[in-house]
């Protein structure tokens, strides 16, 4: 019997994101020792932080079966608003952050309203708010770069126990998101809504509220990610946050989140996805890859990861067919001859 | 007689002018099992949806335990202690049993929003114990059998303190053992004082379970009374409004000698083993087995949906291990799947669009850049809609999801008939459809065989197979355990074969089934 081989294979398939992550890490490490230096790794983690924060919000929305294309514009507008207010009224950085998050929340609410009340499909709604947001931001800033005072840029260098601030915030966001998804009623209902919204409605779940919460969280986290990024960059130009939505979606999907909803998790899923993307970019720089080749290689790696994920799902589904029946504990019937031992996957 | 726990008074409901319910008045006594029967479209589901708060009645009112009951939504019904065990279960396959039980409110740690996991597990285990289901609450739903899923659904209902439970066709996807288990559970619930509304097309089951039977026809209550007043014939008579003398059409011709499809020792480890049989022209071959015996898996392999490891399948051409669905369809094979909603139909699309799907390539005009000959296609589809008597307002605009189960099934079959199949594989072709529609489906199968096609018909209803088939294969645990000709049909022997692997499993297990 090659059941050992079989179970190893299943194990490997279940953990494709982790294996991809380790594989990419090893390859870049071998190609360039510089890649493995502490400074480079810290940079990857810092860079991954702001995309990661946004990707966590994106994961919430994707889990409900929706999508949010407006996160990039959201972070632009919220950062511009905060920056301009700081310039004009020299408000405190804390207040600026609160305002920034509030603008993000407004974005989330607008999306949520259109999706849950006007019943417009999320793709179209958030595409519209993406354009609207970008336009609004340009209007506010007159398309000029908005510089942030020292009080904010100083935050980018803040450390906690030697760990850079962005990483600390990212860790906090991930932890909170994990608790919400795995350990609260709301979290479980998000999975339920994503699995089948009609069934969720029939089960007495307030599906509108669940969806709305996901969009609001995504909006707030997008603006938080923007603020974290601003604290590092120091200013916001008119292209700030462009294409971020795709990086966030890619991070979530690379981490195993399904675009159809109901499947995925923040940890390890989205965290690995965000790190993987940044690692690829950093690795390409560290190995001094031709500048024009970089996007192509990055695309190829991301494609490979998603392809492996798709292969994995087909293979697992096929294996799943072999053990159609799960036996009851006490029956003790030696009925497992045609089945693999039931492997309990954590339902997260 | 005690006060009725539930009272419907003059309930009426119409959809877009079509009358679904008309002046329904009905009283249900507490602690009683009421069998609700009627053909598809008779209004059973509408009545139950009104009761469950999914729909609002146009006229009339309901009383629950003597008080007016006006549910605004499903949540109100749940709060009033009413639970629905639907035909399609409302469970979330991506979540665990415990998650499903508490999805609208987990036990929490103090005032925090955090889930009290230990308490949730404990209460989930208690809930499962109440329905005698002995699996871990952490098990994901999509790893359970249909029978177990249903028990979870019942556990959920009881856990929420449901005192009135509605079962809508609960046995369609259950094995006979699971059905038996369900019935003893229903019996126990009644003894505990629950009121049960039991909707089913399986009249024998209704007769066995119910204390009282209510017959609906065309949105009206046509007959009601204690079950002693009914037998199967009177039930059918009341439902249809006339007596049906014959449940199955007579087979007119005998199967020929020409072999249309030859299956030889087809094996896919862990799924099916050593499947061999021939399908002849003009033959209706039945494939019987319990749920999970590998019936559907055989059908999927034959049609090219799944691959197999060894053996041959010959349908005129050479046998290939990896067969494609396209090749099967081109070779004149049709496959009516067991789940018409998920696999058989595009629920949102119109009847015409659905039925045109398979035959579409035939109406391509090569000269005109491969555009379709719309008019010819529509004409043929319309003809088929007429022949099969698919009831709908306008086949071109009516979405399939608005049709009744029987008409949906006719649309699926019509789709394949348009391709003029030589081999028809029908997986549970009469699941969840009413008696009149069943008869029509049997007639279609009959006609197909008359025209020289071979039909492989899979069903869990043995009586149906013995009624329409020329010969019968019985599967158990992935193997064929018995072959019967029409003259040898004997329910006891067929059932014995179907249970074969389940009785001598110990010896088989030692010989080491493939993994």
Image: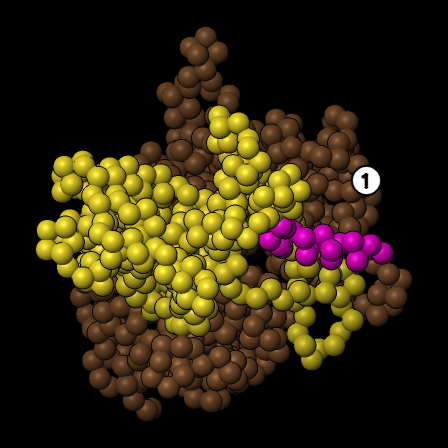
Chain colours: A yellow, B brown
Q: Where is residue A237 in the image (x, y as percent from the top left)?
A: 25, 39
* Residue A96 position in % (x across, y down): 20, 58
Residue A104 visible in the current orientation? no
Looking at the image, which is closer to me, A90 or A246?
A90
Identified at 76% across, 47% down, the residue is B268
Q: Which residue is painted at 42% across and 30% down in the image?
A: B381
* Image position of A202 (left or right of A82): right
Q: Residue furthest top?
A: B367
Vertical placement of residue A285 versus A233, above or below: above
Residue B217 lies left or right of residue B117; in this view the side is: left
Disc 1 target residue: B311
- Up/down of B256 relative to A26, above or below: above
Q: In this view, does A187 lie above or below A69?
A: below
Where is residue B380? Give x, y as percent. Answer: 43, 26
Chain designation of label 1:
B
Q: Is the magenta stretch mostly helix, strand or loop?
A: helix
Quadrant in the picture for the N terminus of chain A: bottom right
Q: Can residue A320 be seen in this view?
A: yes
> Within the image, what quadrant is residue B30 found in?
bottom left
Q: What stretch is highlighted in magenta?
A: A1-24
- Identify the residue at the far bottom of this view: B2
Residue closest to the eye, A121 or A54: A54
Q: Is residue A3 magenta?
A: yes
Q: Where is residue B3, by image quadrant?
A: bottom left
* Relative height, residue B208 to residue B393 (above, below): below
Left or right: residue A81 compared with residue A278 = left
The residue at 68%/56% (across/down) is A11
Total label count? 1
Q: Position of residue A252 (x, y in %)?
A: 46, 50
Q: Which residue lies furthest to the left in this view?
A: A89
Q: Is mark 1 on a helix, strand or loop?
A: strand
């Amino acid at each position: 019997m090659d059941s050992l081989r079989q179970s190893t294979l299943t194990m490997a398939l279940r953990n494709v994101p982790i294996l991809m992550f380790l594989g990419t890490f090893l390859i870049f490490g071998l190609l360039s020792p510089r890649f493995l230096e502490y400074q480079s790794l810290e940079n990857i983690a810092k860079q991954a932080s702001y995309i990661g924060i946004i990707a966590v919000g994106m994961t919430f929305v994707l889990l409900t079966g929706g999508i949010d294309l407006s996160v990039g514009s959201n972070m632009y507008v919220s950062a511009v608003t905060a920056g301009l207010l700081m310039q004009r009224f020299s408000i405190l950085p804390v207040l600026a952050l609160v305002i920034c998050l509030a603008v993000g929340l407004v974005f989330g609410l607008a999306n949520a309203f259109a999706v849950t009340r006007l019943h417009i499909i999320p793709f179209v709604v958030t595409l519209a708010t993406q354009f609207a947001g970008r336009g609004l931001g340009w209007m506010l800033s007159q398309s000029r770069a908005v510089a942030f005072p020292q009080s904010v840029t100083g935050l980018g260098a803040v450390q906690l126990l030697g760990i850079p601030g962005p990483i600390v915030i990212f860790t906090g966001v991930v932890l909170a998101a994990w608790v919400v998804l795995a350990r609260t009623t709301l979290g479980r209902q998000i999975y339920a809504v994503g699995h089948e919204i009609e069934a969720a409605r029939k089960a007495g779940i307030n599906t509108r509220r669940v969806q709305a919460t996901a969009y609001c969280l995504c909006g707030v986290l997008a603006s938080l990610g923007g603020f974290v990024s601003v604290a590092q960059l120091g200013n916001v130009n008119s292209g700030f946050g462009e294409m971020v939505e795709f990086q966030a979606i890619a991070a979530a999907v690379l981490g195993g989140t399904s675009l159809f909803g109901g499947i995925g998790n923040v940890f390890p899923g989205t965290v690995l996805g965000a790190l993987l993307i940044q690692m690829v970019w950093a690795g390409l720089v560290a190995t001094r890859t031709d500048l024009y080749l970089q996007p192509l290689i990055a695309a190829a790696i991301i494609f490979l990861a998603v392809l492996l994920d798709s292969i994995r799902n087909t293979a697992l589904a096929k294996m799943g067919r072999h053990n159609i029946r799960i036996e009851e504990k006490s029956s003790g019937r030696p009925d497992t001859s045609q089945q693999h031992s039931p492997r309990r996957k954590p339902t997260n | 007689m005690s006060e009725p726990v539930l009272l419907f008074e003059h309930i009426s409901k119409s959809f877009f002018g079509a009358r679904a319910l008309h002046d329904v008045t009905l009283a249900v006594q507490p602690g009683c099992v009421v069998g609700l029967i009627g053909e598809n479209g008779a209004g059973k589901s509408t009545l139950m949806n009104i009761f469950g708060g999914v729909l609002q009645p146009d006229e009339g009112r309901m009383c629950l335990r003597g008080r007016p009951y006006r549910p605004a939504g499903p949540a109100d019904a749940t709060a009033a202690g009413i639970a629905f065990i639907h035909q399609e279960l409302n469970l979330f396959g991506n979540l665990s049993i415990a998650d499903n039980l508490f999805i609208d409110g987990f036990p929490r740690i103090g005032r925090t929003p955090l889930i009290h996991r230990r308490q949730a597990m404990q209460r989930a285990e208690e809930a499962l114990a109440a329905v005698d289901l002995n699996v871990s609450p952490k098990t994901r739903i999509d790893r359970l059998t249909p029978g177990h899923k249903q028990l979870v659904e019942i556990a959920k209902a009881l856990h929420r303190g449901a005192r009135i439970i509605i079962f809508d066709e609960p046995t369609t996807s259950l094995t006979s053992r699971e059905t038996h288990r369900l019935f003893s559970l229903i019996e126990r619930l009644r003894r505990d004082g629950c009121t049960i509304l039991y909707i089913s097309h399986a009249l024998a089951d209704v007769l066995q379970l119910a204390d009282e039977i209510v017959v609906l026809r065309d949105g009206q209550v046509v007959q009601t009374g204690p079950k002693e007043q009914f037998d199967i014939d009177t039930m059918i008579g009341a439902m249809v409004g006339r007596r049906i003398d014959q449940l199955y059409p007579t087979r007119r011709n005998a199967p020929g000698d020409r072999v249309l499809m030859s299956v030889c020792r087809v094996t896919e480890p862990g799924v099916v083993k050593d499947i061999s049989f021939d399908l002849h022209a003009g033959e209706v071959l039945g494939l019987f087995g319990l749920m999970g015996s590998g019936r559907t898996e055989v059908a999927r392999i034959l049609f090219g949906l799944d691959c197999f490891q060894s053996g041959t399948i010959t349908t005129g051409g050479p046998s290939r291990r990896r067969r494609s669905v396209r090749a099967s369809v081109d070779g004149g094979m049709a496959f009516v799947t067991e789940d018409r909603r998920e696999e058989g139909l595009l629920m949102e699309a119109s009847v015409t669009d659905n039925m045109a799907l398979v035959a579409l390539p035939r109406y391509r005009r090569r000269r005109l850049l491969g555009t379709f000959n719309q008019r010819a296609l529509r004409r043929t589809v319309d003809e088929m809609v007429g022949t099969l008597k698919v009831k709908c307002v306008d086949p071109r605009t009516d979405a399939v999801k608005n049709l009744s189960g029987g008409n949906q099934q006719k649309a699926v079959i019509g789709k394949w008939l348009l391709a003029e199949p030589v081999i028809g594989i029908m997986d549970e072709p009469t699941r969840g459809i009413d008696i009149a529609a069943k008869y029509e489906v049997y007639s279609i199968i009959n006609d197909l065989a008359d025209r020289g096609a071979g039909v492989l018909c899979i069903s869990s209803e043995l009586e149906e197979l013995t009624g329409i088939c020329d010969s019968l294969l019985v599967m158990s645990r992935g193997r064929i355990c018995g072959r019967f000709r029409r003259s040898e049909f004997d329910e006891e022997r067929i059932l014995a074969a179907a249970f074969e692997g389940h009785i001598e499993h110990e010896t088989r297990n030692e010989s080491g089934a493939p993994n």
